[in-house]
Amino acid sequence: MLKTARETPLLETLRKYGASVGEFAGWITAMDYGNPLEEHVTTRNSVTVFDVSHMGRYLIRGSNLFEFFQKLVTKDLSKFREGRMSGPVLLLNEDAHIIDDIMLYYLSDTEWLAVVNAPNIEKDRAWISKWAKKWGYNITVEDITLSTTLIAIQGPRAPEILESLGVSDAKNLSILEFLRNPSVLGEEAILVSRSGWTGEEVRSHGYEIMTTVKHGKQVFEAAVKAGAKPAGLIARDSLRLEMGYPLIGVDIGDDTNPIEARYWMALSLKKEDFLGEEALRRIYEEGVHRFRVAFKLKKGVRRIPRHGNNVLINNKIVGHVTSGAYSPILGRSIGMGYVEATHFYIGFKVAVDIRGKTYEAKILDFPLI
Amino acid sequence: MSTEDILVKTKLGEYLVKRGLLYTESDEWVKIQDGVVILGITDYAQKKLKYVVNVELPEPGTQVNAGEPIVTLESVKSVADAYSPCSGEVVEVNEELYDTPDLINKDPYGAGWLVKIKPAEPIDESKFLSPEAYAEKIKAKEE
């Protein structure tokens, strides 16, 4: 596995700042820089910079992109326009199970960009191409993952950092809006968007910069010099868990439908005529057997709930954990998982079995902060 | 790091292997001092485990068997056990780790030690890896 792993193009730059590297979804990248809890807190209170170049990036070209994607993804794109992002949107299969959650960028009427999850870089590309062919759209998908970088600057001080990178227009962006070919450090980047996956983006405190590899190295270094603390994937994971954002292949996937996952932000319930719609309507009518929830443990419990741990009420299994982390903001362990629909007890207490010991937990809705 | 110590460099990272210690296949280090065995995890182990947030130690006085898991280390990323290198009695545990478990990351061969065990029988040092052999093992794993 390690032998075939790809390295983020920024790896050498990340190492300069003390990155502790590891593998995620076949990529070697920074897991942390010594203290991921501090990186998490700094993201919430100040500003951090993440290399997220392991996410897949495609340029998608064709003459009927709107029509094609309107059929392919869950979210209604009728208001989507140039200079905007839409997402997360879901790629569903015919059974309404989740292939991936992706971000779309409207570059022009004939060119869109998609950012997809690292484990699905090949799969999504094949999926998009397959349906374009099947439906008779003349669409090309160019994978630009390895020739570009994606850098996320997240936290309340992010606007300052963008300012010092010379992107003065960044502050005028609304959430999920982007600048095309903006000047960053006096050089043209591919785009700068107001976005992220830490939760800071919803407070308008998140930016992402997509650019070439060479320029990306300069941008990362300049962001650190301007005061952004480097942060790794471990902090990114605990940040997204506080927000209740699901992770593909862990909390959602091809064994999950978006209704039980309560992935409302990726759905437009009134939308018609898209792949998986028929199955989704059937599921909606028939109902689901489980729901995705968040939960938190009591302060002082040091153990962290892990994928596969059981959720119990009076020793009866009523669900399971899909992700867990320690939240330095809440000062306790938190998690995400599924409970049976018959036990969808938001606000109620349950127990979580962590390595043979049970701990009291409270089921909550998202976000946790 | 003393000049004697070994710094193993692989494409994934750099790992310190200290001289004067014995090593196990399961990435612990062992030091025998005044008839007591001191156990810790190696720099390689802590770097793989990542930032430690929780350590569960045995009670002093616990009788342990060689090869038995006696310490649970929980990081932000995963959970791992440390195994007893010998049979005997736990005579002391590193209580500092309850409040500052990241001592294991900051100083794995020093302040991040885990437990002290009084062995039931004299230790057979040939059952452990030398620093050189352990360094080779890390290299082989990451090549």
Image (tube, coloured by chain):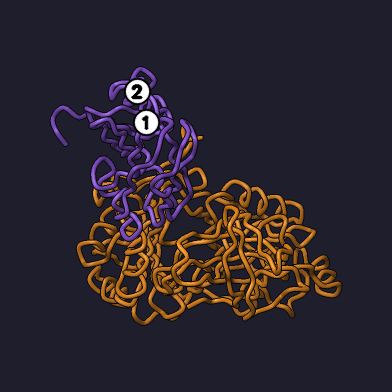
Chain colours: A orange, B purple
Residue at the location (30% across, 59% down)? A230
Most foreground residue, A268 or A282: A282
C-alpha gap between disc 1 and disc 2: 7 Å
Chain of the residue under the numbered disc 2 shown in the image:
B
Most foreground residue, A330 or A265: A330
In the rendered image, which quarter is residue A262 located in? bottom right
Chain of the residue under the numbered disc 1 shown in the image:
B
Residue hosting label 1:
B119
Image disc number at residue B88:
none
Q: Is residue B109 visible?
A: yes
Q: Is label 1 in contact with label 2 (beta carbons under 8 Å)? A: yes
- Label 2, secondary structure: give it: loop
Relative vertical location of residue B95 with respect to residue A242 in this rendering, above or below: above
Relative vertical location of residue A42 with respect to residue A51 in this rendering, above or below: below
| Residue A85 rendering spot, x and y as whole percentages | 52, 71
Q: Please, what is the three-letter code of the amino acid marked with disc 2?
A: Pro
Q: Please, what is the three-letter code of the amino acid marked with disc 1?
A: Pro
Local packing at callout 2 (Cα closer than 10 Å; few below 14, some 14-19, many 20+) is few
